[in-house]
């Protein structure tokens, strides 16, 4: 079954890209990310001046250790941006902002949502004023501002997913359309061979990424690069990308997830940290707007591939592969 479906494709190793240190959950930066950081600095200064009691109480509840910590952490809003490089944490019961996880909107995209909502609000007010003082037909401009706002709101949705309980299942890390299924050359895998599945995420897909298998985070690597269309063949080796290597809990094999940027917004988010234990279906980050996600596993561990090129998959719920119990 596997051999009949596998199509050998080119090695998916970055061409001329160099990994750089990871300093935040969104190492590529971006305008909204810079705004959120600037807001955080202002908010922390205000809290220390106006609410010192709150600052002391939250500091007492903070857990973990971050020697010579370069991050200014008061509460979970600050930790959100540097969770993957900071040793501090908060228990859910001590996190006064945990309710934001229940909004069914990607928490890493809330700043973008507020930014675009502000723009569309101003445009809507302008449309109303034009309709009121110029001509009633100009009220129709309100529709042209509401439509893109609804699109942005839809893009950052984070729906609940039912995670398969099958221990041999390898679940999809992303929503989208399968573009590649087959064997690839990769020296990091046994025998230099891996089985790779690529998924293209259009702007209409959910862009929250999920962990495909239960295991432990072995390493994280970030590669700045170009921003070709995520459907282009060369994007896997030339575009900005984030590599997440997991050690599979059941087989001990290497599982690699690649978040690859696209041509539109170009922002990759990953909040996992090295040596962290993760569960299949757990959220690991997102890619903002058009993008691509790939998974690679040791060829010898694949029992059966369950998807083909052109299939539509859903992150956390679609089973891409069935895995063997061991090498």
Image (cartoon, rainbow, N blue to C red):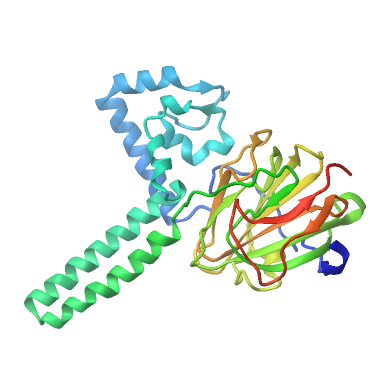
Q: Residue at x 81, y 69 (%)?
A: 9
Is residue 133 found left or right of 300 in the rendered image?
left
Q: Is residue 111 left or right of residue 261?
A: left
**Residue farthest to the right, as pictured:** 191
Q: Nearer the viewer, residue 49 or 55?
A: 55
The residue located at (63%, 53%) in the rendering is 173
Nearest to the observer: residue 57 or residue 214 = 214
The residue positioned 28% from the left and 64% from the top of the image is: 120
Q: Position of residue 86 (x, y in %)?
A: 55, 32
Q: Quadrant of the C terminus?
A: top right
Task: Residue 20: tell me if it is visible.
Answer: yes
Nearest to the observer: residue 259 or residue 49: 259
Q: Is residue 112 above or below residue 139?
A: above
Where is residue 314 drawn, in percent x and y? Answer: 58, 58
**In the figure, is residue 85 to the left or right of 300?**
left
In front: 141, or 85?
Answer: 141
Taking the view exactly as shown, the residue that stands out farthest to the left is: 133
Left or right of 95? Residue 222 is: right
209 versus 10 height, above or below:
above
- The N terminus lies in which quarter of the figure? bottom right
The spot of residue 180 in percent (x, y) is 73, 68
Q: Using the image, determine if residue 45 lies above or below residue 191.
A: above
Q: Position of residue 276 (x, y in %)?
A: 65, 34
């Amino acid at each position: 079954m596997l051999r009949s479906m596998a199509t050998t494709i080119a090695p998916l190793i970055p061409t001329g890209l160099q990994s750089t240190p990871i300093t935040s959950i969104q190492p590529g930066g971006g305008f909204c990310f810079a705004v959120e950081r600037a807001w955080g600095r202002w908010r922390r200064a205000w809290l220390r001046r106006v609410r010192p009691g709150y600052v002391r109480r939250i500091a007492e509840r903070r857990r973990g250790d971050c020697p010579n910590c370069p991050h200014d952490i008061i509460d979970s809003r600050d930790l959100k941006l540097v969770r993957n490089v900071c040793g501090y944490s908060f228990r859910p019961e001590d996190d006064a902002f945990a309710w934001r996880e229940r909004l069914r909107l990607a928490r890493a995209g809330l700043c973008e949502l507020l930014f675009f909502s502000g723009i569309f609000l101003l445009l809507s007010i302008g449309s109303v004023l034009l309709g009121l003082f110029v001509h009633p037909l100009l009220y129709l401009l309100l529709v042209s501002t509401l439509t893109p706002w609804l699109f942005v709101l839809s893009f950052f949705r984070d729906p609940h997913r039912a995670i398969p309980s099958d221990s041999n299942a390898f679940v999809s890390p992303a929503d989208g359309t399968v573009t590649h299924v087959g064997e690839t050359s990769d020296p990091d895998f046994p025998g230099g061979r891996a089985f790779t599945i690529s998924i293209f995420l259009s702007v209409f897909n959910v862009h929250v990424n999920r962990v495909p298998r239960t295991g432990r985070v072995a390493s994280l690597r970030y590669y700045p690069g170009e921003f070709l269309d995520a459907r282009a063949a060369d994007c896997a080796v030339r575009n900005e990308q984030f590599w997440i290597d997991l050690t599979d809990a059941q087989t001990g094999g290497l599982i690699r997830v690649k978040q690859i940027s696209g041509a539109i917004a170009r922002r990759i988010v990953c909040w996992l940290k090295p040596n962290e234990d993760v569960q299949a279906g757990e959220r690991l980050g997102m890619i903002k707007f058009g993008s691509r996600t790939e998974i690679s596993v040791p060829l010898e561990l694949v029992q059966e591939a369950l998807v083909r090129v052109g299939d539509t998959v859903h992150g956390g719920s679609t089973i891409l592969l069935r895995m063997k119990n061991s090498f």
